[in-house]
Image (cartoon, rainbow, N blue to C red):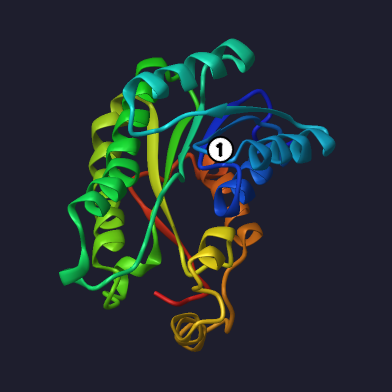
């Protein structure tokens, strides 16, 4: 029996990359998983098919996490299919890299809308319906908040905000029995990183060189850490930031 049998999880940004790795790991431990995604219908269908092909239960729900109405629909559809949500993973994020002088208002609002407002809305919706027991939130941040890399001010600041929000939410929600932790991956080989040309770039080579374990992360490196944080094995852990970055922080 898996560690998450009879529990329901929502993974935002769960159709690709780190989110998909987390969704697969939660499902492997027995959780029923709702995969929230923003655009790519086929990737979401493929993720559901992969989970179901391994004997798990999954559902794909298209939702813009920066919109309260769509977040409400996400939780309503998940509850209708699987019951109340025990595990919320806030993984959905958008990113780009540019110098401070090149940040536009549009890009600022795009990143803060998804990366900060999104988790606020999903955590609010989660808290409204959280079961009395075994409720947990995992906010996916980044180990990059420790590096202060030039060109990453906008994206990293959104994740710094989410890290602080995690620590405060852990205190505010503890009385309801809800644990809240952050999972901070290092540089990871994902579709998003490849589409921006990060993989194979000088930036990636510098990150590999500064990582004690000597490589980029993979989604399958991150998923089991999320499954641990969601399980009873982590029942005494809340308000923490767990780095999964090969020692790079």
**Residue tagged 1:** 232
**Residue 160 at least partly seen:** yes
Q: Quadrant of residue 236?
A: top left
Q: Position of residue 64 (x, y in %)?
A: 41, 32
Q: Quadrant of the C terminus?
A: bottom left
In the rendered image, the vertical position of residue 186 relative to residue 56, given as above or below: below
Q: Quadrant of residue 51?
A: top right
Residue plotted at (23% across, 73% down):
99
Residue plotted at (63% across, 14% down):
81
Helix, strand or loop at label 1? It is helix
Q: Position of residue 223 (x, y in %)?
A: 61, 52
187 left or right of 83 in image: left
Residue plotted at (44% across, 82% down):
203
> Relative to the observer, which residue lies in front, 184 or 239?
184
Residue plotted at (34% across, 42% down):
114
**Residue 1 at least partly seen:** no
Q: How many other residues sit within 10 Å of disc 1, few (<14), some (14-19) or many (≥20)?
A: few
Q: Quadrant of the N terminus?
A: top right
> Relative to the observer, which residue lies in front, 88 or 39?
39
Give the tally of numbered discs: 1
Q: Quadrant of residue 52?
A: top right
In the rendered image, the vertical position of residue 160 relative to residue 39, given as above or below: below
């Amino acid at each position: 029996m898996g560690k998450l049998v009879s529990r329901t999880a929502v993974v935002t940004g769960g159709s690709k990359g780190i989110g998909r790795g987390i969704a697969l790991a939660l499902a492997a431990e027995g959780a029923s998983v709702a995969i929230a995604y923003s655009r790519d219908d086929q990737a979401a269908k493929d993720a559901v098919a992969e989970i179901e092909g391994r004997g798990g239960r999954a559902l794909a729900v298209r939702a813009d996490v920066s919109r309260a109405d769509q977040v409400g629909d996400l939780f309503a559809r998940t509850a209708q299919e699987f019951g109340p949500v025990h595990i919320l993973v806030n993984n959905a994020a958008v990113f780009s890299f540019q110098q401070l002088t090149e940040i536009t208002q549009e890009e600022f609002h795009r990143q803060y809308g998804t990366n900060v407002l999104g988790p606020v809305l999903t955590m609010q919706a989660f808290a409204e319906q959280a079961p009395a027991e075994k409720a947990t939130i995992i906010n996916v941040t980044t180990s990059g908040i420790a590096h202060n890399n030039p060109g990453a001010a906008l994206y990293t600041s959104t994740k710094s905000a989410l890290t602080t929000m995690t620590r405060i939410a852990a205190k505010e929600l503890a009385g309801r029995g809800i644990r809240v932790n952050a999972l901070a991956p290092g540089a990871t080989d994902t579709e998003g990183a490849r589409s921006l040309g990060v993989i194979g770039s000088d930036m990636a080579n510098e990150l590999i060189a500064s990582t004690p374990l000597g490589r980029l992360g993979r989604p399958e490196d991150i998923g089991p850490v999320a499954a641990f944080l969601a399980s009873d094995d982590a029942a005494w852990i809340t308000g923490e930031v767990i780095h999964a970055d090969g020692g790079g922080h």
